[in-house]
Amino acid sequence: MKRLLLLLPVVAFLFVGPACEEEGPGATSAPAPVATASETAGWQRTATLPFSLIYYDGHMHTTRSDGSGSVEDIKATALRRGLSAVIITDHCENLTKEKWEALVAETTAVSEPGTFLALPAFEITGNEGIFNRTHMLAYNVSDPFVGDDVNELCPEEVWPDPPNPAGTGPMYPENLAKWADYVHSNGGIAVHNHTSGSTRLEYGVDSIEVYNQSHIDDIFGYAKLLGYSDEEALEFAIRLSDLALYGERDLNTPVPFGGQRIPLRLAVYSATKMLTGVGQWLGSPEAPLNSWDQLLMAYVDGTVDTPIFAVANSDAHNTGDPDSKVGVAKNGLYVKALTAEEVYGAIKAGRSFATTGPSLAFDVNGELMGGTAHIASGGSADLNLSVSSESATAILVKIDIIKNGEVWRTISPMQPVYEDTPVDGGVTEDGYYRVEVTSQDQPNGPYHFAWSNPVFLNVP
């Protein structure tokens, strides 16, 4: 992150984009939306029987690495914000065998059967690039160290990811695949975090962070130092964050540079070349950015055997502070029980949605998110959708249903809740549907977002 923060003032100076309907000025500093009573009252049944909806945040740090709080501090904030589970991901490079064992013991001690679950995990920390940062979360891995534990070798030490002097993404992308292989060989889940659209299929990860609150906050803060208004700073931060969702979609947006307007990608390259002597690309011919939809279509067309699902996490470092960010970004997860096995199974299956506020239930012909609906050619897909702003002061302003990477339908409820079953008739090809939700605090407050994982279609 250090390289990113050093160069952000230059990049932020260049960026003047069109107004966009994104989060409002106060969103990054506002408290996390508090779960409603129906979400926190325990194992109440929902419309998605036999599953119940819980919330978890899967990326945060303690004093064992670069966080300010303890496991107990994290639990206190998590419960206050309606979370049922947290996954604590200290940096492997800061861990020792003793620290890891203590983390395992402490997470076990604070967990309460059926009420709260704390799980130990770790973050593999590679090159601190500008935007293409190579970090990976490792869930459900019992040992972070490769080989003999006495050597305490993290995956990034065995398969290093040094800075690339050419500025075109990872120098050794095959080593990121080896990180994921190590995680999978230990029965774990690999999550590519704060990706800025840099995820490649060959990495073999299970999920990507489509929203990382710490990433948003860092960019927001540096833009504010340049004199940006809250609204402008947040717009800039969201634009860069959205690279994880939309890939190269906005990279050719014209921005001012040197008295003229040039594409954002070229402006960033020119500015970093002036500053460091090496131009850095937001995507490049050698390392193009991928949208989440491109990654999903690779599963649909058979390029890869497993889909890549989406998560949103806080990446909280101020975990011991009164304004801790734990739970500001989170995931709604449909589970049958509050156990580590069930939580990790649901994450692996994509039975979840990522959110900064709204909740949703989404299925196609009875198949929940992450599943596959089998439809005869020419048949109909019934999209059962239930969405709530989860706030007494917010309304749902926009719901996009995405089909195979394109907006299939846009709905503007302008009310706190929405339920409907749109029907897509005459389905003739494999594909997927997913949902994007935007809510807004009224009358003119900040925006909040949710992203469902997809339901796939199989048409024999």
Image (cartoon, rainbow, N blue to C red):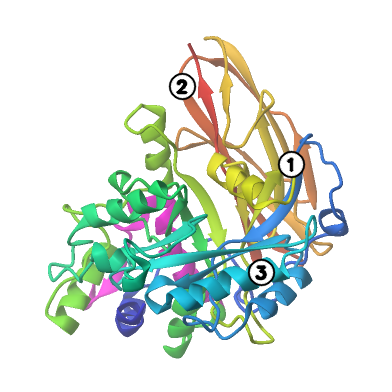
* Dominant SS in magenta: helix
Point out residue 314 in the picture as x, y percentages from the top left corner: 57, 68
Q: Are marks 3 and 1 in contact (CB under 8 Å)?
A: no
Residue where numbered disc 2 is placed? 430
Q: Is residue 269 magenta?
A: no
Question: Residue 331's quadrant in the figure?
Answer: bottom right
Q: Is residue 248 magenta?
A: yes
Q: Residues within 10 Å of mark 3 (few under 14, many from 20)?
A: some
Residue nearer the viewer, 61 or 24: 61
Dot 2 or dot 1, earlier in sequence:
1
Q: Secondary structure at mark 3?
A: loop
Report how far apart the C-alphas of labels 3 and 2 lie in the structure.
37 Å
The amino acid type, in three-letter code, at marker 3 is Pro
Report how far apart the C-alphas of labels 2 and 1 lie in the structure.
29 Å
The amino acid type, in three-letter code, at marker 1 is Lys
Q: Secondary structure at mark 2?
A: loop
Disc number placed over residue 434 in the picture, else none: none
| Quadrant of the frame with the N terminus | bottom left
Residue where numbered disc 3 is placed? 446
In the image, which residues are magenta?
A: 231-260
Dot 3 or dot 2, earlier in sequence:
2
Q: Is residue 184 left or right of residue 399?
A: left
Residue where numbered disc 1 is placed? 336
Residue at the spot x=44%, y=43% of the render? 308
Dot 3 or dot 1, earlier in sequence:
1
Please name which of the two marks, 3 or 1, marks the residue nearer to the observer. 1
The amino acid type, in three-letter code, at marker 2 is Asp
Residue nearer the viewer, 173 or 423: 173
Question: Residue 197's quadrant in the figure?
Answer: bottom left
Q: Residues within 10 Å of mark 1 (few under 14, many from 20)?
A: some
Report how far apart the C-alphas of labels 3 and 1 lie in the structure.
33 Å
